[in-house]
Image: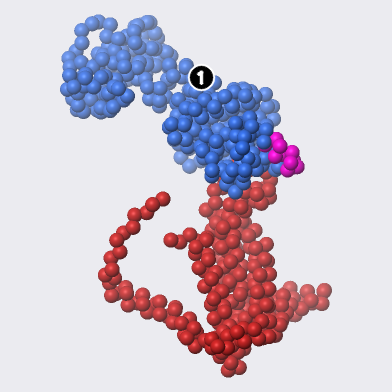
Amino acid sequence: MSLDADLSLRRGDLELRAALTVAPGEVVALLGPNGAGKSTVLQLLAGILPLEAGRVELDGVTLDDPAEGVHVRPRDRRVGMVVQDYLLFPKMSVLENVAFGLRSRGMPRDRARAEARQWLTRMGLDGYERRRPGELSGGQAQRVALARALIVEPRLLLLDEPLAALDAGTRPAVRAELRRHLGGYGGCTLVVTHDPLEAMVLGDRVVVLERGGVVQQGEPAEVARRPRTDYVARLVGLNLLTGAASGRTAQLPSGAVVALAHDATGLVHIAFPPAAVTLSPSRPEGSARNAWPLVIADLEAHGDLVRVTADGVVPVLADVTPLAVADLGLEPGGQVWASVKASEISVYPA
Amino acid sequence: MSRTRRTDDLRVPAGLLIPAALGVAILVLPMVGLIVRAPWGDLPSILTSDEVLTALRLSLVTATVSTGVALVCGVPVAWLLARTTLPGRSVLRGLVTVPLVLPPVVGGVALLMVFGRRGLVGGWLYDTFGISLPFTTEAVVLAQVFVAMPFLIVAVEGALRTADRRYDDVAATLGATSWTTFRRVTLPAVMPGVLAGAVLCWARALGEFGATVTFAGSFPGTTRTLPLEAYVAINAGDSDVAIVLSLLMIAVSVTILVGLRDRWIGAA
């Protein structure tokens, strides 16, 4: 009772090779930058694109197995889809949209409509039956799209950037609501997003896809605490370095040495928050500190703070107060010492 | 959406103004001539004469039936051209749009070759069922479909190409067959294009002359449509009737084009 997919496809510049599993009732967030192949994964799972190699199995039923010539058509797969712009059928009423799946499966009109009405009630859309999709707000349209997909009881629900079309003001409320509705759905859910917050809030598990491959997966907190790629590190707002550890030091490819708080060996990731970085005009005192002379590349407002991008033997992001920027006279091209306490650094095997 | 309008520069260069005026004159003067020369006093009696009413009725019926046939056959052709990856699709597109540029008389000759009593299909029809198409009202319809259906196909194919195919994908994931998807999702989405195509097709069928006269002849009541009636009147030296019929057809064309512009083409 789950999704077990091993996807392989070459399409233009994209070379997709990704294995995915989703347990029943589980919501997996597929997180990745644009062009990573996220939408291609959805199209493959929905059966819209044919798989080149690999296998897709849902609840013990083989949906795709190109080697055996198996490809179940989209309409027979029982895979539901809700996309970013919802794609509600514009010429149909809300009720007809929701009833569409049942009608397509041959259910008589009255029964299909009665069931659609129940779904609208469940989605808090009583009284919207006769509206046209164009008359709905983004959040309402999303609930209609969700009801339309869920009414046919799909075994796998695919959500493609479900919150991207909403304005920032309504997004949190709709996100919480979507989380609630997904909680009540017993099937497998795969949410595709490029927004880390969305992935963390909606997903029971986060799978990070980059350049067609899975680069990291785990519980949201785990992914947020221990990023394994620059992309994830940037999303969760951490500095990430990779080096060879031996005892309480790690050597970076650039030759720079990082002092660690605990013993470690082998290839490790080294992560620390930008707020833990201290900038100073000269080499700071204290033995437990890592300190590197760097050149400032960029300054950028970041909430109440200023995010400083510094390059050198160790590329570092640092969050400092605007006051510190003025005191230190920070500007692009300027020299600065960046230091981090070893105790602020988290180290984990690469 | 608001569009900022440029202040109109009234100094149009003479190099553009003169040829433009000439172009407009070539297009509009003939119609003005008809209006000026029209026997306005005799208009009611000519319009209600038996010949004109018979031709008018025949034209309206045949153009409407032709449009119906073109819809039933042309929309599927447009769908094939727009939505499938059939090999030889571009050749097929070329073939079905040839009548757009073909002289209608040539079309009429071609129809005779195929549907004439000794034609490829016509011979078989006659030998098997005793059906002879040429010089019947059915032949008028066939000739009109031949010249007018490409207009519909082109319009509908364009609409299908711009329609978002992801709606079809969503319908499929909801369990719809491709026929259900076409009927309930695709067709409603391209309906404006289908209507525009149907109206263009109807107007073209109404004005059809060359293929009709060649393939169906000019028999009052069965094949003599409005354009043929006008031609007969001119040949008989009855220019008043010819002018009135011409005005009638111009009025229909202008009404349709203006209506299309406002409703479907969406030109500003």
Does residue A181 appear left or right of residue A34 in this picture? right
**Is B77 above or below relative to B121?**
above
Which chain is the one coloured blue?
Answer: A
* Tag 1 subunit: A
Residue at x 70% of width, y 39% of height: A113
In the depicted view, which residue is nearer to us: A192 or A230?
Answer: A192
Per the image, the residue denoted by label 1 is A218
| Magenta span contains residue A277 | no
What is the crowding at mark 1: few (fewer than 14 residues within 10 Å), some, or many (at least 20)?
some
| Colour chosen for chain B | red
Res B220 visible:
yes
In the depicted view, which residue is nearer to us: B180 or A303?
Answer: A303
**Is A58 above or below relative to B69?**
above
Residue at x 37% of width, y 5% of height: A262
State whether the magenta stretch is mostly helix, strand or loop: helix
In the depicted view, which residue is nearer to us: A148 or B158?
Answer: A148
Residue at x 45% of width, y 26% of height: A196
Q: Position of residue A337 (x, y in %)?
A: 21, 17
Q: Position of residue A256 (x, y in %)?
A: 28, 16
If the image is split into quadrants, where does the C terminus of chain B sit?
bottom left
In the depicted view, which residue is nearer to us: B79 or B247?
Answer: B247
Q: Position of residue A257 (x, y in %)?
A: 29, 13
**Kind of residue sitting beneath label 1:** Gly
Please state the extent of the stretch shown in magenta in the rendering: A105-116
Q: Position of residue A205 (x, y in %)?
A: 53, 21
**Is B6 above or below relative to B215?**
above
